[in-house]
Amino acid sequence: MAEMDLQRASVLLFDPVHVNLRTTRYALNEIGFRSIEAISAVEEFQRQLRDNSWDMIVAECSAPKVDIFKFVRMIRRGEITPNPYSVIALTSWMRDGAHVRLAIESGADDVIVRPFSTQFAEERIRTMIRKRKAFVVTSDYVGPDRRSGDRAAEANDSVIVPNTLQAKADGDEEQLREAYMGIRETKKQIEGERIRRLAMRIVVTTELQFDSKAGPAKAFDPADMMKAARELCDQLEKSGRYDAVQVAEALIDHARNFRNPDERNVKNFRLAKELAIGTYAAYANGQSLEKAENEIASTVQALRTRLSSAAPGSSVQDLPALKAATM
């Protein structure tokens, strides 16, 4: 790879099929990588993720009985490896759009469909080094920003994450030190944004119930609210903010009421909203979600518009693309 020295870059390569593992390792070696840990057992793959900080991860995502997408989501959330911002390239023998979309939505940088030439793989890796996308954070996604056109131009919520692969490819020791130092700071920034987004998701869900046109039977999914509340509580526990955890636990207790349709009234939804706002305020040292009022209002309006034209019985859960983009 011209003008790049990849010999020092560490690569974790996973593929349960040995012949594919050897083929991909050969291609990476031809491109210039020398420090390659090739793994075929998922348990060893998980151990290597836990014990080491990798510059790039290459993993086959079409293998049966191995949920690579789950691993990618855990990586991006900082739950399983020291460097959540490793460049991640997924390989796949499956070409159908639904599978590729799942791969992209997991938070990977790129998906390379097999069979591929060494030259093609080199071009894709070069793009991930030189033109890597900034990251965005929603309540259920952490990864490269997939927005394009006007939405991308208007967005100001993206995060430039550390790229140790680029620093090593450039041989820039100062850039590499800054990248390593930036991992902890970026993790904290993304952690805070994800907590904010989870709280916002609950607020938006409750706001939808205040409009009789949407109606609880059409727009409300109690399981989704409970899931968001539990994830919010889990994230707060990981951050060590136990004062906020107490408020989040009260939110979880209150959310259980919504299993009973008779409890889905404006009073209870308003209390759930207040608890979500209070949870974030406890985490953010008194900072409120009020600064996000315009963002919440626009999200609620967009969802109301979509729900008003959706099939009877639809809910926010039935609008994953809009939910991921706005919450």
Image (tube, rainbow, N blue to C red):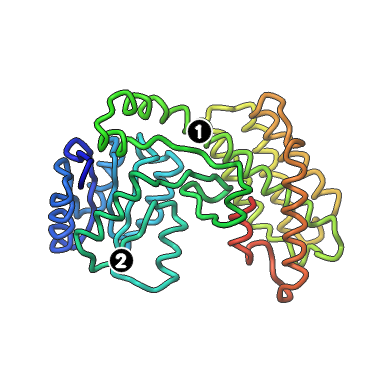
Q: Position of residue 243 (x, y in %)?
A: 64, 26
Side (left or right) of 164 relative to 31 = right
Nearer to us in this view, 111 or 251: 111
Q: Position of residue 267 (x, y in %)?
A: 86, 49
Badge 2 is on which residue? 113
- Is 242 above or below relative to 79? above
Residue drawn at (53%, 36%) of the image? 191
Q: Quadrant of residue 217?
A: bottom right
Nearer to us in this view, 74 or 183: 183
Mark 2: amino acid: Val
Depth check, mark 2 against mark 1: the one in front is 2
- Is 141 above or below relative to 221? above
Could you tell which of marks 2 and 1 lies nearer the N-terminus?
2
Q: CA distance from mark 2 to mark 1?
A: 36 Å
- Is 163 above or below relative to 180? below
- Mark count: 2
Residue drawn at (47%, 32%) of the image? 186
Q: Is residue 65 visible?
A: no
Q: Seen from this angle, which residue lies furthest front?
A: 3
Mark 1: amino acid: Lys
Q: Position of residue 110 (x, y in %)?
A: 37, 55
Badge 1 is on which residue? 238
